[in-house]
Image (cartoon, rainbow, N blue to C red):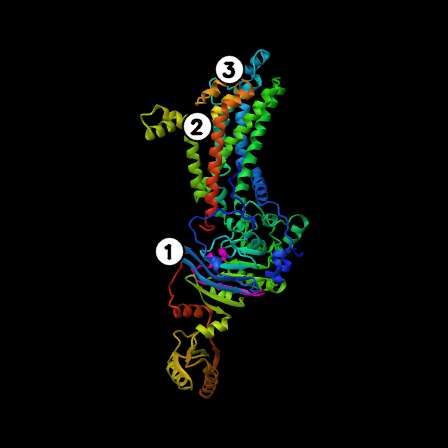
Amino acid sequence: MTANATSAPVATSPASTAPAVERIRLRPGWITIAGKEFADHLLSVRLYVLLIVLGIAALIPLYFAAEQIRSVAANASITPAVFLYLFQLSPEGVPILRVDLWVGISAPLLGVAFAFDAVNGERHEGTLPRLLSQPIHRDDVINGKFAAGLAAISTALLAVVLVISGVGLLRLGIVPASSEIIRVALWLLTTILYVAFWLAFGLLLSVVIRRAATSALVAFGTWLFVAVPFFGPFLISFISGVLAPDDPNARHLIGQVLPSTLYSDISGVILNPTVQTTSRAVTTSQYLQAQSFFPDSALSVTQSLILIWPPIVVLFALTVGCFALAYVRFMRQEVRA
Amino acid sequence: MAAPTPSPSPATGERRVPRKGRLRQRERVQIPDDVGPIATRRLSKRYGDLVAVDNLELDVHAGEIFGLLGQNGAGKTTTILMLLGLTEPSAGVARVVGFDPTRNPLEVKRRVGYLPDNVGFYDGMTGRENLRYTARLNGITGSDAEARIDNVLEQVGMTDRADTRVDTYSRGMLQRLGIADALVKDPSVLILDEPTTAIDPIGVIEILGMLRTLVQERGLAILLSSHLLAQVQSVCDRVGIFAAGKLIGVGTVPELAAQFGEERGHIEVGFEGLERSQYAAIAKTLRSSAGVSEVHEPVRASEPFVLMTATREDTGTVREAVLAAAAAKGLRLSSIREVVPSLDDIYRRALHAKGLAGARGAAA
């Protein structure tokens, strides 16, 4: 055994020499944990499910709608933002298989799938006390797991976007304008933010709920009622009906803080320059600003961004709030059950 | 997303969420610098009204194996978690390898190897990969890490199975891998929580022998907890008897026997080829020997006679007398031995002496 610079002198006279010992500069613990978790994700069944689900999003619409897009591409010179259309086309009669809608539905599920057992899984396996007895801060565990989940999903989403763009470029001959590239990049970033919210939510469940199976069920149920468009309105009606049955604005307000609504607004505006309003209330000045700068149909990237800035901020706040809650609960939890 | 990380405290850089409404009393208690690798003064942990650890004063010296013995729920694991800075004490202080684990948990965890109760590993990885992860978390990488991992695997006898997945391991192998895992960081103190639970007897002997070797080779101090008293009796230099969060007795096994053991001597005498009809006569003969206060006849043929003497000093003369009597009566002795009180007996008596029999604390 090679002598460890820190521990060898300590063994002989711990109290007097230890504080004077030169400290080894450790890589922050969360990076090591994130690295291990990311490697686990890359080998996990979950990632393959994720790639299949997102692959459906990418390839089926492209396959079925190839004809449709060719006819559009023929008029490319007069159709603005035809590249963005790649992300919004759906096969005839199956509107749900639109890339942006499909990602909006599946991304939350993938987010929670990578986090629902992050902490309670370690607890169940009996690895948590061993992990925490290593020289790392306790929050390194939760930070590292969050970073790893985000990295895995971002990688997958990036791959999907690149595949769609690649097919559009090579097979259909659609060349994006610079503003379209920026819009796609923004869409990717906001989608990652949306996934981050669900990741933080899954992490919270994994901290609060002791059994991984229970937290998976809760996560799935939440996803069903919040993220699936078919159930979403029911939930909004239900909450507004309970809280304020007589107030017509209540429905609207609840829709404004529901992450799925926020994301669909953001996604709709970013991918379609002709969309000038979100379904949610933007301040009047912002609305007029957007209108006055560009009286004709298409908005510039900056204008669209101004339009969706509020929902982005709300989504970011929800994400941070969720993560903070998980963080604080985890820091205060006993190591043992 | 960026976490709202609480600002690091200036002294240690440790991030910690402050607890509200907690009056820190531990500042009042001081521990001198010249204590051993583990020392606690008035260390206490309360969960609401339950007192898990009650004003614990514990000292573990360098180069010894110290056994913390107690029933489930006596507060052993809580104590260990406080020593590692994984649980905050309600009052009192601890000093581990020269640091306060509450204020400086990283320095402590860098130098202390810990085998948790029911240790677990990542199922999908091999034993070696699990150890590599631990090494990385300790800032040990590359060829240094590989050399250390090879070394500790050999030390615990797991080299052959190191490259198979952990989910194929038996409980005993997990336990041995757990010890290897605790050794990777080359600690100066090893804390083992119930290292022999759920292991077959031969595995227990192997593990305990291994611990002895580690102390000899590396000069480690080892603190181990157990509720299986007889098993650890053989390996511990000193033991502390723990009940209801209190340390009710500390010392070597003979010291504790003197303190809590039975005052009377206890001798077992076996004879060869006895008929049941002879028992009464033999018992009478034995009873007449000087110093014998009680004789119990065997219930089954295979059992010996049990003699109790008035004091423990009497046992020598009684053995002589028994030998002479047997020779005089033409009886064949098959065995004669003094029964030394086991740690189990000592433990039971210590609990009775302190009025704690049947008392159980809050946490295991």
Residue range corresponding to the magenta coloring: B61-82
Tell me the residue that label 3 is attached to: A292
Callout in the foreground (1, 3):
3
Q: Are the numbered discs 2 and 1 placed on the same chain, yes or no?
A: no
Residue B347 left/right relative to B101: left
Q: Residues within 10 Å of mark 2 (few under 14, many from 20)?
A: some
Q: Amino acid at mark 3?
A: Ser
- Asked if residue A22 can be seen in this view, the reply is yes
Q: Distance between the Cα atoms at labels 1 and 3?
A: 67 Å
Q: Amino acid at mark 2?
A: Val
Tell me the residue that label 2 is attached to: A228
Q: Secondary structure at mark 3?
A: helix
Q: Distance between the Cα atoms at labels 2 and 1?
A: 47 Å
Which of the pair A68/B96 is nearer the observer? B96
Instruction: Please give the name of the residue rendered at 48% of the width and 66% of the height, measured from the top-left corner.
Output: B240
Q: Residues within 10 Å of mark 3 (few under 14, many from 20)?
A: few
